[in-house]
Image (cartoon, grey):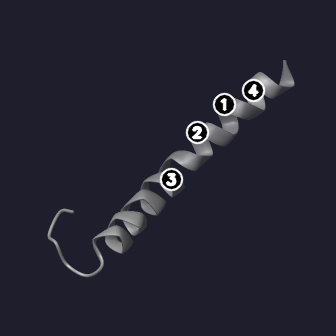
Amino acid sequence: MDMGNQHPSISRLQEIQREVKAIEPQVVGFSGLSDDK
């Protein structure tokens, strides 16, 4: 897609995983809050 290499989706996947790990705490706290109420 981006570079047309053999593993564009793999690097993209790693990117997404990194973003998810960075956002996860916020999401968990948010869902926990809405879950509590």
Among the 4 quarters of the image, the one containing residue 29: top right
Total marks shown come to 4
Judging depth in this view, the residue of 6 and 24 nearest the camera is 6
The three-letter amino acid code for the residue at tag 4 is Leu
Residue of label 1: 30
The reply to whether discs 3 and 1 touch (Cβ–Cβ < 8 Å) is: no
N-term mark: 2 or 3: 3
Say the numbered circle drawn on residue 10: none
Query: Which element type, helix, strand or loop, lies under badge 2?
Result: helix
The reply to whether discs 1 and 4 touch (Cβ–Cβ < 8 Å) is: yes
The reply to whether discs 1 and 2 touch (Cβ–Cβ < 8 Å) is: yes
Which residue is pictured at 34% across the width and 64% down the height?
12
Mark 2 surroundings: few (<14), some (14-19) or many (≥20) residues within 10 A: few
Which residue is pictured at 48% across the width and 61% down the height?
17
Query: Which element type, helix, strand or loop, lies under badge 4?
Result: helix
N-term mark: 3 or 4: 3
Q: CA distance from mark 1 to mark 2?
A: 6 Å
In the rendered structure, the answer to whether residue 14 lies left or right of residue 29 reads: left
Which residue is pictured at 44% across the width and 61% down the height?
18
Q: CA distance from mark 3 to mark 4?
A: 19 Å
Which residue is pictured at 41% across the width and 65% down the height?
13
Mark 1 surroundings: few (<14), some (14-19) or many (≥20) residues within 10 A: few
Residue of label 2: 26
Q: Nearer the viewer, mark 3 or mark 4?
A: 3
Query: Which element type, helix, strand or loop, lies under badge 1?
Result: helix
N-term mark: 2 or 4: 2
In the rendered structure, the answer to whether residue 25 lies left or right of residue 3 reads: right
Q: CA distance from mark 2 to mark 4?
A: 10 Å
Residue of label 4: 33
N-term mark: 3 or 1: 3
